[in-house]
Image (tube, helix red, strand yellow):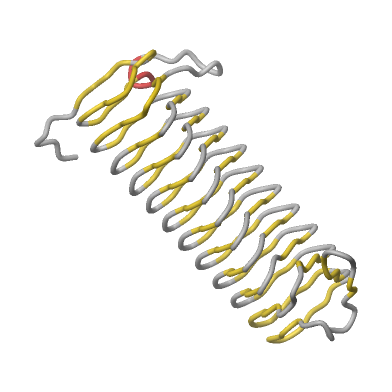
């Protein structure tokens, strides 16, 4: 069933809303021609998708059986969860976690007080920040920095227009590349190269070129920065000069 409405506010008196123990439930595909504001004291669960031409705001969390899409930003006080993808023309922010069965894409930044998890990749025009870990089945591409309070683990590659910082380890099935520093409290492991313009630092071991899906050689195994500070277990260190310019 498709629920199609203009700019709207969903509160406890919204037609068709069911109050269950830990959440409110709404059956159907919620489509808003304008902005959507959710004023509920508990999580809102929508059986199908949630889509707004403009922005989506919620006091607590939102959960959709399908995808969540906004033409502008998505700002939620609790968690954001979707069985498919999550997409916003501007930024995405959550007071708890962000989780998608498929990809997460934002025209600006993505921020979560807890973790960020995507079955596919994460793509942000700005920075990506998570209070806990970041995990994806594919890669991460951020126009700004990537920062996680715990570990970062991706099935593909990681690319950042700023730095990459992890309170745990950093692990990628492909390459890891940043315009600024790459820093991890634990170790760093990449299926291909590890490259940045300033410093690669970690407390423990560094591995580059560990891919099992191809023969890693040459550039695939390079660990490149002006300074590499960590225990290099596998890979070829290539230091950039202080006067290096791309």
User: Where 195 falls versus 55 (above or below)?
Assistant: above
Q: Residue at x 80, y 58 (%)?
A: 65
User: Where 57 falls versus 115 (above or below)?
Assistant: below
Is residue 71 shown left or right of residue 200? Answer: right
**Residue 232: horizontal and vertical position, in percent?**
34, 17
Q: Residue at x 86, y 69 (%)?
A: 25
**Residue 112: horizontal and vertical position, in percent?**
55, 57
User: Which residue is more in the foreground, 174 or 132?
Assistant: 132
User: Which residue is more in the foreground, 59 or 190?
Assistant: 59
Q: Residue at x 46, y 63 (%)?
A: 108
**Residue 82: horizontal and vertical position, in percent?**
72, 56
**Residue 147: horizontal and vertical position, in percent?**
44, 47
Is residue 94 shown left or right of residue 197? Answer: right
Which quarter shows the N terminus? bottom right
Q: Quadrant of residue 208?
A: top left
Residue at the extreme left of the image, as rendered = 243
User: Which residue is more in the foreground, 114 or 218?
Assistant: 114
Is residue 200 shown left or right of residue 151? Answer: left
Q: Residue at x 60, y 77 (%)?
A: 54
State how many labels appear: 0
Q: Quadrant of residue 19?
A: bottom right
Which quarter shows the C terminus? top left
């Amino acid at each position: 069933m498709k629920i199609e409405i203009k700019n709207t506010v969903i509160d406890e008196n919204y037609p068709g809303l069911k109050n269950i123990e830990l959440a409110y439930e709404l059956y159907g595909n919620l489509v808003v021609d304008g902005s959507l504001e959710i004023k509920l004291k508990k999580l809102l669960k929508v059986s199908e998708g949630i889509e707004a031409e403009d922005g989506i705001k919620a006091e607590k969390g939102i959960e959709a059986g399908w995808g969540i899409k906004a033409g502008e930003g998505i700002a939620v006080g609790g968690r954001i969860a979707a069985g498919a993808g999550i997409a916003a023309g501007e930024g995405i922010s959550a007071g708890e976690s962000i989780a998608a069965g498929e990809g997460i894409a934002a025209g600006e930044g993505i921020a979560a007080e807890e973790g960020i998890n995507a079955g596919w990749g994460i793509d942000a025009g700005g920075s990506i920040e998570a209070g806990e870990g970041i995990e994806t089945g594919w890669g991460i591409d951020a126009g700004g920095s990537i920062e996680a309070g715990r570990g970062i683990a991706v099935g593909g590659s990681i690319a950042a227009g700023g730095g990459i910082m992890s309170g745990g380890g950093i692990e990628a099935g492909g390459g890891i590349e940043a315009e600024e520093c790459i820093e991890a409290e634990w170790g760093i492991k990449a299926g291909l190269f590890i490259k940045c313009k300033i410093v690669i630092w970690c407390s423990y071991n560094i591995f580059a070129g560990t891919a099992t899906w191809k023969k890693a050689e040459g550039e695939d195994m390079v660990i490149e920065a002006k300074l590499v500070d960590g225990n290099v277990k596998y890979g070829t260190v290539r230091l950039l000069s202080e006067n290096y310019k791309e």
